[in-house]
Amino acid sequence: MHTRARLTVVTGPTSRPTFQEEVARFLRHAEAKGLSPATVRFYQQRLDSFATRTGLTHLHALTPDLARSYLAQEREATSPATARHGWSALSAFCAFLLAEGVLDANPMEGVARPRIPVKVVKPLSEGEVEALLSQGSPRTFCGTRLRALVLLLVDCGLRASEVVGLNEGDVDWNEGTLTVMGKGAKERTVPFGQATRAALLSYQTRRGELPGEKALFVAAYGTRLRRDDLHDIIRRAGEQAGLSGLHPHKLRHTCAVMFLRNGGDAFSLQKLLGHSSLDMTRRYAELAQSDVVAKHRAASPGDRFLSQVQKGGGRKRLR
């Protein structure tokens, strides 16, 4: 078992700006730039974690070696992804301090970004999606809501936060599109198909009018559905369908892979999902092509000569 050793640093004179003072100023700067509340909270949590783990109080003690030690501990104690998050927050913070003239050099410039092992993202099959859609009665509020949520996630590839952030006014029934607020407060238009339209209309009928509540998806008592609620709904429906550990993001993965396998192109998928680059889209493209194994088994050129290989069985002397 590894113990979490506390990193120690030597603090400097109190006349210099403290780490927490500059963090507070950085967060005000992020808010003024219009970054989303979720992004501001992310920066605060990661920088608070850094200060707590290292004991750092003054900026002069923020060195590349200290950052590397912190990231190594984060990787070991939590996960490579958490270490990557810490690196991102520290890099943004130090870039701000450098631009403001608080630092003469960026201590994160020589700190390598933690690598994250690339995991194979396995999407749901069509049969598994059908099993998920069959959960819950279509004659109940919860049943119609489940179908609308599943189809929205599979058809449009929305993030969980984007789904629960939708308002009734974000649905354009004439055009068949949604106005979605994505990461970094970036707005995008996302189309939906006929099946999703039918599921949304059925849900909308069950939802009815809720004075004072503009959220598209609501809980049983008429308040906006929370992100944790969405995760619980999908997880429980998955368990009932025999799909353990199911979460909304896996349905987003499923949307991406099915879109490409059905003839969609990578650039359109990038816009659909709201990705800032093609990096993640390329991973989906590789996964969409992974069924080449099954296709090869069905059309293997070599298997045309299988009878020639199988001729003359029995044991023979090795030569």
Image (cartoon, grey):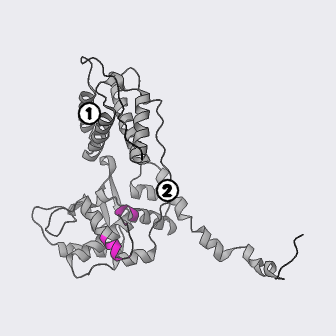
Please state which amino acid type lies under the numbered disc 1: His
Residue 146 falls in image quadrant: bottom left
Q: Quadrant of residue 84?
A: top left
* Residue under pointer 2: 119
Query: Where residue 190 sits: x, y (%)?
Result: 35, 60
Q: Is residue 66 left or right of residue 149?
A: right
Which residue type does callout 2 highlight?
A: Lys
Look at the picture and state if 251 lies above or below 103: below
Q: Which residues are magenta?
A: 236-250
Q: Nearer the viewer, residue 207 or 169?
A: 207
**Is residue 60 covered in magenta?**
no
Mark 1 Cα-neighbour bin, 10 Å: few <14, some 14–19, many ≥20: some
Describe the element under mark 2 as helix, strand or loop: loop
Q: Is residue 74 visible?
A: yes
Mark 2 neighbour class, 10 Å CA radius: few under 14, some 14 to 19, many 20 or more = few
Q: Is residue 269 above or below residue 311?
A: above
> What is the secondary structure assignment of the residue under circle 1?
helix
Rendering quarter of residue 59:
top left
The quadrant of the picture occupied by the C terminus is bottom right
What residue do we see at 57% from left, 68% from top? 291
Instruction: Tell me what residue is drawn at x 40 percent, y 57 percent.
Output: 273
Q: Where is residue 99 drawn, in percent x and y? A: 35, 26
